[in-house]
Amino acid sequence: MEYLISNKDKYMDHPNIKAIAVLKMKGLFIDEIRKNQKMTSMTDDEGNDLQVVDDKQNDISERIGLKDETKKVLSAIKSMGEKCQEILMLASEGMSMQEMQEVTGVKSLGTVLSRLSNCRKELKGLVA
């Protein structure tokens, strides 16, 4: 989101700024996944591939569980209304309430706070 804010003059006239934000978030998410994958490929004496895993990396069962949970959360978010999707996306970027107010065009900071709170409650209910 910082990228969009710092380049707002470039994107303000774009007909679908939300799509740009989603694509940027997707790229950041993929970068984070790649950063956390600390695997290198090596071969043994017979030329077979070996994989050395960093001690910090989760074991495969934990990773599968996290992947399933992530799919469940993303599916729940997609089923929510457009306003909830937008406010949750902005919050996940670490934006302040004032920044969310500016991006969404909401006139009251209280509206941003209540919308975020209500959307989080709705998401918690959908995921549970």
Image: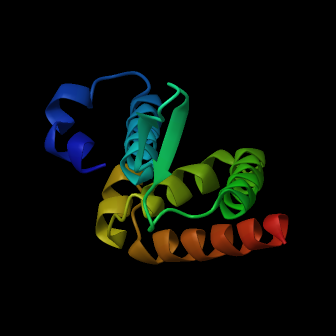
Q: Nearer the viewer, residue 70 or 45?
A: 45
44 relative to 79 in the view: left or right: left
Residue 14 in sight here: yes
12 relative to 43 in the view: left or right: left
Give the quarter of the image for residue 27. top left
Residue farthest to the front?
45
Q: Is residue 13 above or below residue 72?
A: above
102 relative to 65 in the view: left or right: left
Q: Is residue 21 above or below residue 14?
A: below
Q: Is residue 29 above or below residue 116?
A: above
Total tally of numbered discs in the picture? 0
Residue 31 position within the rendered picture, expressed as x and y whole percent measured from the top left: 37, 42
Q: Residue at x 55, y 28 (%)?
A: 48
Q: Quadrant of the C terminus?
A: bottom right
Q: Nearer the viewer, residue 88 or 16?
A: 88
Residue 18 in sight here: no
Residue 41 position within the rendered picture, expressed as x and y whole percent measured from the top left: 43, 36
Please name the colour scheme applied to the rendered image. rainbow
Residue 91 position within the rendered picture, expressed as x and y whole percent measured from the top left: 45, 63
127 relative to 17 in the view: left or right: right
Q: Residue at x 51, y 43 (%)?
A: 51
Q: Residue at x 36, y 65 (%)?
A: 94
Residue 46 position within the rendered picture, expressed as x and y whole percent measured from the top left: 53, 27
Q: Nearer the viewer, residue 48 or 12?
A: 48
Give the quarter of the image for residue 93. bottom left
